[in-house]
Image (cartoon, rainbow, N blue to C red):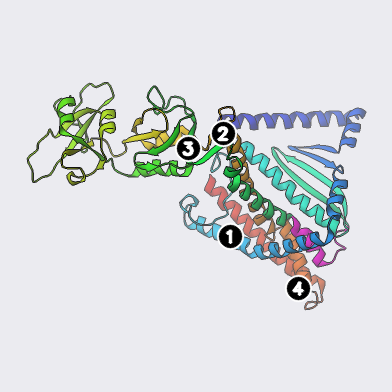
């Protein structure tokens, strides 16, 4: 989904919400009985840019899950309580650290530092991944609320039902419980921390699946030996008669081996920053194929000696020793592909080549690179230009399909979804555990204060005031975080 398509999708969602709200107001004002009966029986509620759905359809299943293996579940949710409490100070530190780093530097310049960075479609999240964004939010929210519901059933709390809310296009799930305040603080903690605990567990499961996916798909896909071209941007100069085509398996870029998407991107970045190397070729080839014309300086670093060539010839500069007479022309116009195929290795100075060979370096601008892309079948692809164009034009996959009828898009989609779930689910756990109004952390800190200070501070209003102060601090911190992130995005 491109940015234009994303805007069209958002516009359509806006129109649909307006239409639903219009008909809702119209039918309710007319007391349209079939419509009111439909809303009452389905649990739907239409609000401005929000659609609510309340249901008890899953209560019985949750009751079954919550009553199975009580001792195991007791240990499970108790472990979740301790883990959630342990990560609360870590979450607060990460948010504060992110605020400080972002205010001192640009968030984009701190990629090596552990930060809590929001993922925003169109900013640091490709608009093409918007579908994964929505699906991941829904899965993470369901896992979170199922955790609350199962823990509540385990503590004999009545489960009223679930409500699903669609805020414009963002889906959220909420668990509704009755008689929760009557529980002891330790039981409340087990219920409150269950959502965070399930999000952490979901993130770990997704990470394990993403890691083991190459072995799970091994009978159908190869992994870790090369990358396969999935698509090429239309009009890119890397495509064409002698260029890359969809399905090519790339094994090497210049002298950099390609073993996966990460190494493929690293190789292109490496060649972007490195200077062009020369090629070791014999003098007989120069004398036979040189088609140079009087050389002229195009710029301070570039010399043109090919004249009106067909685009396949390139001007090469002879890198000779200052102590020896020049045996060959300083500049020679040679067929680039022939030089690449004949060359015995790279060179940057005369001593790099064997005695019978000479070092010739392409005369190019600093941003222009001569890149050789090696593939398992077909000739070497010769690309002359900026490696950034290849980086942005060619989409590749780590999964090399053995059978053409099984597309690599299947493991790619599963891997990407698992990566999204890992990041979003763990991020949801980090944010939710922070003591802030309307988040689980607000109630978790209140239960912790009750449990720890019940005997030391006998006045309940004082304990509530302590919890309130901590919650206000967490709320202000998150507000500052959101403002700082918003300023960074805009």
Label 3 and label 1: CA atoms lie apart by: 36 Å
Q: Is residue 173 left or right of residue 424?
A: right
Circle 2 sits on which residue?
408
Q: Which callout, 3 or 4, points to the residue nearer the camera?
A: 3
Q: Which callout, 2 or 4, points to the residue nearer the camera?
A: 2
Tag 1–tag 2 contact (CB < 8 Å):
no
Q: Which callout, 3 or 1, points to the residue nearer the camera?
A: 3
Circle 4 sits on which residue?
452
Tag 4–tag 1 contact (CB < 8 Å):
no
Task: Specify the label residue 417 is tagged with.
Answer: none
Q: Of callouts 3 and 4, which one flags the residue occurring earlier in the amino acid sequence?
A: 3
- Seen in the picture, residue 31 relative to 148 is either above or below; the reply is above
Task: Specify the label residue 227 is tagged with.
Answer: 3
Q: Of callouts 1 and 2, which one flags the residue occurring earlier in the amino acid sequence?
A: 1
Q: Residues within 10 Å of mark 1 (few under 14, many from 20)?
A: some
Q: Of callouts 2 and 4, which one flags the residue occurring earlier in the amino acid sequence?
A: 2
Label 1 and label 2: CA atoms lie apart by: 37 Å
Label 4 and label 1: CA atoms lie apart by: 25 Å
- Find the magenta span and give its range: 179-194
Task: Specify the label residue 94 is tagged with.
Answer: 1
Q: Nearer the viewer, residue 18 or 74?
A: 74
């Amino acid at each position: 989904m491109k940015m234009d398509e994303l805007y069209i999708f958002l516009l359509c969602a806006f129109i649909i919400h307006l239409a639903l709200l219009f008909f809702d107001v119209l039918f309710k004002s007319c007391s349209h009985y079939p419509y009111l009966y439909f809303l009452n029986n389905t649990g739907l509620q239409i609000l401005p840019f929000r659609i609510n759905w309340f249901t008890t359809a899953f209560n019985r299943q949750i009751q079954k899950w919550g009553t199975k293996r009580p001792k195991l579940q007791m240990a499970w949710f108790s472990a979740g309580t301790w883990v959630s409490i342990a990560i609360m100070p870590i979450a607060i530190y990460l948010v504060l650290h992110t605020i400080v780093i972002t205010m001192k530097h640009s968030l984009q310049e701190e990629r090596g530092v552990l930060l809590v960075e929001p993922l925003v479609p169109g900013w640091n999240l490709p608009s093409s991944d918007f579908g994964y964004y929505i699906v991941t939010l829904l899965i993470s929210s369901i896992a979170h609320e199922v955790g609350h519901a199962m823990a509540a059933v385990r503590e004999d709390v009545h489960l009223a039902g679930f409500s699903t809310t669609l805020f414009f296009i963002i889906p959220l799930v909420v668990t509704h419980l009755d008689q929760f305040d009557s529980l002891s603080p330790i039981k409340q903690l087990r219920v409150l921390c269950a959502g965070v605990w399930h999000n952490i567990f979901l993130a770990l499961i997704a990470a394990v699946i993403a890691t083991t996916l190459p072995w799970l798909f091994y009978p159908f896909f190869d992994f870790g030996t090369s990358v396969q071209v999935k698509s090429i941007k239309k009009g890119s100069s890397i495509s064409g008669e002698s260029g890359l085509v969809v399905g090519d398996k790339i094994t090497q870029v210049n002298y950099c081996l390609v073993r996966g998407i990460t190494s493929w991107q690293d190789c292109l970045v490496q060649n972007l920053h490195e200077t062009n190397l020369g090629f070791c070729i014999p003098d007989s080839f120069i004398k036979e194929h040189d088609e140079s014309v009087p050389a002229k300086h195009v710029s301070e670093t570039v010399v043109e000696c090919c004249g009106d060539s067909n685009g396949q010839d390139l001007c090469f500069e002879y890198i000779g020793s200052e102590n020896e007479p020049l045996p060959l022309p300083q500049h020679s116009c040679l067929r680039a592909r022939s030089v690449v195929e004949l060359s015995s290795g790279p060179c940057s100075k005369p001593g790099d080549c064997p005695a019978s060979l000479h070092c010739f370096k392409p005369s190019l601008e600093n941003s222009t690179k001569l890149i050789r892309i090696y593939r398992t079948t077909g000739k070497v692809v010769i690309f002359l230009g900026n490696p950034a164009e290849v980086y942005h034009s060619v989409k590749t996959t780590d999964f090399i399909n053995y059978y053409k009828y099984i597309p690599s898009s299947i493991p790619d989609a599963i891997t990407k979804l698992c990566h999204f779930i890992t990041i979003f689910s763990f991020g949801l756990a980090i944010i939710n555990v922070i003591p802030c109004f309307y988040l689980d952390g607000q109630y978790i800190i209140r239960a912790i204060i009750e449990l720890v200070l019940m005997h030391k501070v006998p006045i309940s209003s004082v304990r509530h005031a302590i919890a309130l102060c901590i919650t206000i601090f967490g709320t202000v911190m998150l507000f500052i975080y959101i403002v700082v992130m918003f300023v960074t995005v805009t």
